[in-house]
Image (spheres, rainbow, N blue to C red):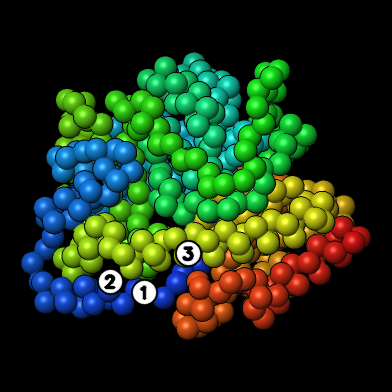
Amino acid sequence: MEPMPPEPRGPALFGPPVEPSGLPVLPGLAERLAASAGRGAPEPVGGGPELLDAACGYWARRGLVTGPERLLAAAGPQPLLLALLAAVGGDVFTTRPCAPWHSAQPLVLGRPAYPVPVPAECGGVPDPFALLETVHRVRAEGGTPRVLVLSPADDPTGTTAPPELLHEVCEAAAGEGLLIISDETDRDALHPSPVPVADTSDIPDTLGAPAAAAPPGDPAPAGRGRPVFVSPAEMLPGHVVVLAGLGTTLLPPGWPAAIARFPAGREGAGLRAAALGVLAGTRTGPGAPLAAAVAHALTEPPDVTERLRAAARLHGILAAALYRTVVRHGALCRPPRAGDRVYADLGPFGDALAARGIGDSVELEVHLTRRLGFPVAGGHRFGDPPDALRVRFTTEPLLAPDGPGRLRALTAADPLDSPHAARSLTLVTRALDEWSGG
């Protein structure tokens, strides 16, 4: 079984994509950061008491009661994942596609990262049968499967995993002795009124592994209302470490901070201690002034929770508009349920793209970015094979470039009624019209 290989085109084309700049910094957070600027002493490795106590409240409000002795904090989810993988050892399994930092950390450690295709209905979790097949193959070839990294609210696909599917995946992973690391960075970015979920039974498996047919009489998935989010830690608490990057929800994207929650018991304590040792060696904790602002945000004061709700609504409306634009022209795309993105498969336009000299996602990314005038990330950046014509669109280009304009969009009755949204959607429509013959 071959792990994710280095790509021949070099790290620039296959590295992390350009990420959205986000919304303006909340005044309350800026004030807290400024008030702590005089704190010159280093923050304790893994987080100080104020930050960890606030993180306890954050998890408790999400049904995951815990104590500070089961938590760690660092300057972003990447160093936390790196510390975890270094502590656990062995081979790592990720989803295909996945957030670039999921597959990057094992490669930094010189470890294999084995991608497993996602099912047709969502991203973020592996198809359970494909996971078992991959684990068995790696073990038969002398590997040591140890870790599965998944994301119930996913980047790049913007989807959420149905609880029943997530439970099946977790049971399969635990049965094979895998530690589950659940990236829950976007659990607070669920769209309040997502677009209806389409029937995935006829979605070709170019989007992932084939979907299993629903048993006769099973109800169809709900198409309206806020998505249901269930953490793997609620299903198999002794087998799951939960990571939450805070820079896309509670904090601005440029303020790197994340927290991790470990299982209870001796094994969880040992894993936390080993990960803490790695963090101590790398000194990747947030600086003291930022730690004070992080602790404040984790208490979720009214201005933070109001921003969370408004941002989820805004990105939900904009992502739904992108989704409708893409599928109306015949491209394949899962309905977005969380975050600021959609992940489209433009394979149906393969002949039209080939006639224009576009044969893979690298060339497609370059062409679309130049044509549209804003960044579009090819699927190769998320671990998908380059010959799959997939791209990730984000809602960033539908927003005004300035802070005041973005704040107006947060409270607008219709965020699509803006020149920036109209222009970006028109540009996407024109490109798809040309390729689809529309």
431 left or right, relative to 224: right
Position above or below: 290 against 94: below
158 left or right, relative to 424: left
Q: Which residue is situated farthest in the left direction here?
A: 41
Is residue 351 at least partly visible in the picture?
yes
Q: Secondary structure at mark 1?
A: loop
Residue 29 got which mark? Answer: 2
Q: Amino acid at mark 1?
A: Val
Q: CA distance from mark 1 to mark 3?
A: 12 Å
Q: Position of residue 276 (x, y in %)?
A: 18, 43
Is residue 124 at least partly visible in the picture?
no
Position above or below: 97 against 372: above
Observer-nearest of 220 and 59: 220
Q: Secondary structure at mark 3?
A: helix
Q: Position of residue 28 (x, y in %)?
A: 27, 74
The residue that mark 3 highlights is 311
238 left or right, relative to 14: left
Q: Label 3 neighbourhood size at 10 Å, few (<14), some (14-19), many (20+)?
A: many
Position above or below: 128 against 258: above
The residue that mark 1 highlights is 25
Q: Quadrant of residue 5?
A: top right
